[in-house]
Image: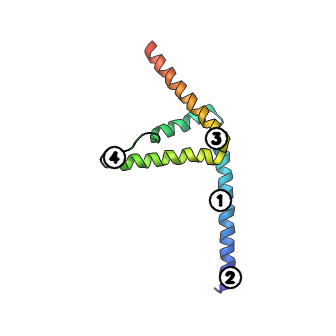
Amino acid sequence: MNRENRTITDKNDRRYFEFKDRLIRENDIKAWRKVMSSKEGRWFVMRLLDFTKYKLPSFTGNSQTFFNEGLRAVGIHLDQCIMSNLGIEGFKLKQKAEKEYVLEQERVKQLFEEE
């Protein structure tokens, strides 16, 4: 392969990856908007974030810390995805999700106490 063909291939490769990245980003935005626009979707996201313990300290003093940090990294990434894909809309939807999540936890607690 001569140098000129290689340059064209490199340009095509770059164009392909830029095109692919743009489509993936568009799909990510649509997906996050869809998930965060429903109460059930927001619940699911909050359950995932809760599972990752992304807001809690992860240090245990032993190897469990590495596992905890891995979970936290996923949670932090998900949280950042909401914001980077949806911007201020994502911020508002995440706040709505957090409020709904807390209210549901309070409802469950109240139901338990009434039982």
Question: Which residue does the image show at 50% across and 25% down from the upper left?
Answer: 105
Q: Is disc 2 in contact with disc 3, using a CB cutoff of under 8 Å?
A: no
Q: Secondary structure at mark 1?
A: helix
Q: CA distance from mark 1 to mark 4?
A: 35 Å
Looking at marks 2 and 3 on the same chain, the residue that comes earlier in the sequence is marked by 2
Residue at 48% x, 37% y is: 50
Q: Which disc number belongs to residue 114?
A: none
Q: Residues within 10 Å of mark 2 (few under 14, many from 20)?
A: few
Q: Residue furthest bottom?
A: 2
Type of residue at label 3?
A: Gly
Residue 94 picture location, percent across and down: 60, 37
User: Mark 2 is on which residue type?
Assistant: Asn
Type of amino acid under label 1: Asp
Query: Which residue is disc 4 drawn over?
Result: 64
Q: CA distance from mark 4 to mark 2?
A: 52 Å
Circle 1 residue: 21
Residue position for label 3: 90
Under mark 4, the amino acid is Gln
x then y, percent, for residue 68? 39, 45
**Mark 4 or mark 2, which has the lower sequence index?**
2
Compare marks 1 and 4 and give the one earlier in the sequence. 1
